[in-house]
Amino acid sequence: MSRQADVERVTKETGIRLSLVVDGSGKADISTGVGFFDHMLDGFARHGLFDLSLRVKGDLDVDCHHTIEDTGIVLGTAIRQAAGDKKGIRRFGSCILPMDEALVLCAVDLGGRPYYASDHVFQSPCIGTMDTQMVREFFYAVSYSAAMNLHFKVFSGCNDHHICEAMFKSFAKALDEALTPDPRITDVLSTKGSL
């Protein structure tokens, strides 16, 4: 059974079409109008082995906020839909990922309760045309729309590009692990009996 989702969201600020295949090969076809954000999402798809197609038309004449936050809402919704009833999956995933001098931990729980935590503050206001404040807004939106716990810990790093890229790639690896089926799990991995 193919685990995938197609989500469309249109507001006065953004128009977004997204297709996600969880059991993919890392193919990415992405256009958000924010170059560095495209680069981060491409890394997310490739390192999580997700197939991701994304088209965003946002009010970039204002700034990148709505484009990035709303993409997080749509991606989180797609993750939740593609995960289905979550029977047989590992539910938890984590990754400690190095990116040159940066070292980042990401931990995920697809337990149905949204929570986002990160203690990192970027030093630069922007990376390319992407406001670094939007990294938090994006992952917050993903975590709440997907109903997942999502935690980051930045252990080291001085280059904001490397730190941000390590966050996106570690998220991809942690999410891939959490979504991976385990033949020993015959129902949902929860003492409650549902996720």
Image (cartoon, rainbow, N blue to C red):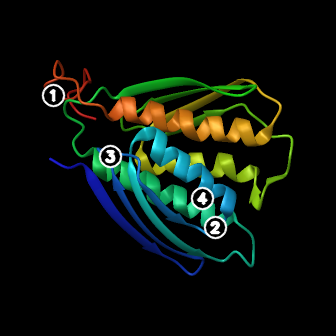
Pick whichever of labels 1 and 3 is earlier in the sequence: 3
Pick whichever of labels 2 and 3 is earlier in the sequence: 3
Under mark 4, the amino acid is Asp
Q: Secondary structure at mark 2?
A: helix
Residue 181 relative to residue 94: left or right: left
Q: Is residue 143 visible?
A: no
Q: Secondary structure at mark 4?
A: helix
Q: Residues within 10 Å of mark 2 (few under 14, many from 20)?
A: some
The disc label shown at residue 102, or none? none
Image location (x, y in percent) of residue 114: 47, 40
Residue 57 relative to residue 114: left or right: right
Pick whichever of labels 1 and 4 is earlier in the sequence: 4
Image location (x, y in percent) of residue 71: 53, 61
Under mark 2, the amino acid is His
Q: CA distance from mark 1 to mark 4?
A: 36 Å
Under mark 3, the amino acid is Val
Q: Which residue is mark 4?
A: 38
Front of the two marks 2 and 4:
4
**Pointer 2 and pointer 4: residues touching (CB < 8 Å)?**
no
Q: Which residue is mark 2?
A: 66
Residue at horizontal 75%, vertical 43%?
Answer: 161
